[in-house]
Amino acid sequence: MSARLPRHHIIKRLVGAGGLYSQADLAVALRSRGVEVTQATLSRDLTELGILKGPDGYVLPGEVNASTRPDLLRVLRDTLVSVEVGGTIVVLKTAPGQASGLGVAIDSSPNDPSLRGALGTIAGDDCLFIATRDARSATKIAAALGESAGLPQRASRDTTRTAAHR
């Protein structure tokens, strides 16, 4: 019998109990229960189980609700390092391990006016992409999120041109 299903069951119990903030924490907890796992396998398990990482640690799918939903403004201020726009994509850089939590906060705030035009998010470890309807939406979302996080405003390319170049 595959060790995957029993391991998944143990992971769900551990995450459900709370207090796990990193894959290293989870690997130690698994090891204490006699389960040895590589980082690659653990990462794959978390993805297969739909487990999300928020500002309060790992959360089981379906447990992100009104009582556990992170406050977008708080998460932005705590984790956002930089914001860039590439066409219709907003690229958010975060502290290591924080992109998923920021993605949860953004996905949990669909009615936030600063996110008007956002279609969805994809998160890695320290980078989050927001797909937008159009380039104008991307620019507005990036500016709003950067301002909310207290990041310094950067001049757009159009405003840095001199009159002679126009």
Image (cartoon, grey):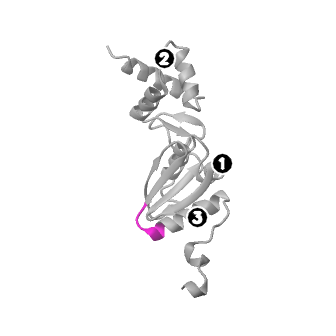
Residue 144 — which label? 3
- Viewer-closest of 75 and 94: 94
Q: Residues within 10 Å of mark 2 (few under 14, many from 20)?
A: some
Q: Residues within 10 Å of mark 1 (few under 14, many from 20)?
A: some
Residue 78 — which label? 1
Label 3: element kind? helix
**Amino acid bearing label 1:** Asp
Q: x, y (%) of residue 165? A: 56, 84
Residue stretch in magenta: 132-137
Q: Are marks 1 and 3 in contact (CB under 8 Å)?
A: no
- Residue located at (58% from left, 72% from top): 156
Give the CA separation, mark 3 to mark 2.
44 Å
Whichever of callouts 2 and 1 sits on the residue coming sooner in the sequence is 2
Q: Quadrant of the C terminus?
A: bottom right
Closer to viewer: mark 3 or mark 2 = 2
**Amino acid bearing label 3:** Ala
- 85 w.r.t. 162: above or below: above
Residue 36 — which label? 2
